[in-house]
Image (cartoon, rainbow, N blue to C red):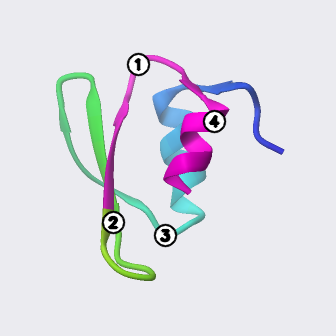
């Protein structure tokens, strides 16, 4: 079960378990990418919290 909100660092740490890795950071946005099951990349806010529903859509 996912918590209601996660910070950018918590999101990045969680997504590493699913094969994502940090690619770059531009300001407050962190770009993550995976090559598992096809190439996929996402941008997440590094300093604000993200609601669990948005994180579920990424996964």
Mark 3–mark 4 Cα distance, whole angstroms, equals 20 Å
> Can you say whether 45 is above or below 33 in the image?
above
The residue carrying mark 2 is 40
Specify the segment rendered in magenta: 41-59
Mark found first going from the N terminus, 3 or 2 = 3
Q: Is residue 49 left or right of residue 20?
A: right
Marks 1 and 2: in contact by CB < 8 Å?
A: no
Marks 4 and 3: in contact by CB < 8 Å?
A: no
The residue carrying mark 1 is 47
- SS class, disc 4: helix
Mark 3–mark 2 Cα distance, whole angstroms, equals 10 Å
> Can you say whether 37 is above or below 45 in the image?
below
Q: Looking at the picture, how far across and down is residue 54, in whole percent? A: 54, 36
The quadrant where residue 11 appears: top right
Q: Quadrant of the N terminus?
A: top right
The residue carrying mark 4 is 53
Q: Looking at the picture, how far across and down is residue 49, in whole percent? A: 53, 20
Mark found first going from the N terminus, 1 or 4 = 1
The quadrant where residue 18 appears: bottom right
The residue carrying mark 3 is 19
């Amino acid at each position: 079960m996912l918590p209601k909100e996660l910070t950018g660092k918590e999101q990045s740490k969680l997504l590493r378990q699913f094969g994502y890795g940090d690619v770059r950071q531009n300001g407050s946005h962190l770009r993550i990418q995976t090559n598992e099951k096809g190439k996929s990349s996402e941008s997440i806010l590094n300093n604000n919290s993200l609601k669990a529903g948005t994180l579920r859509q990424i996964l």
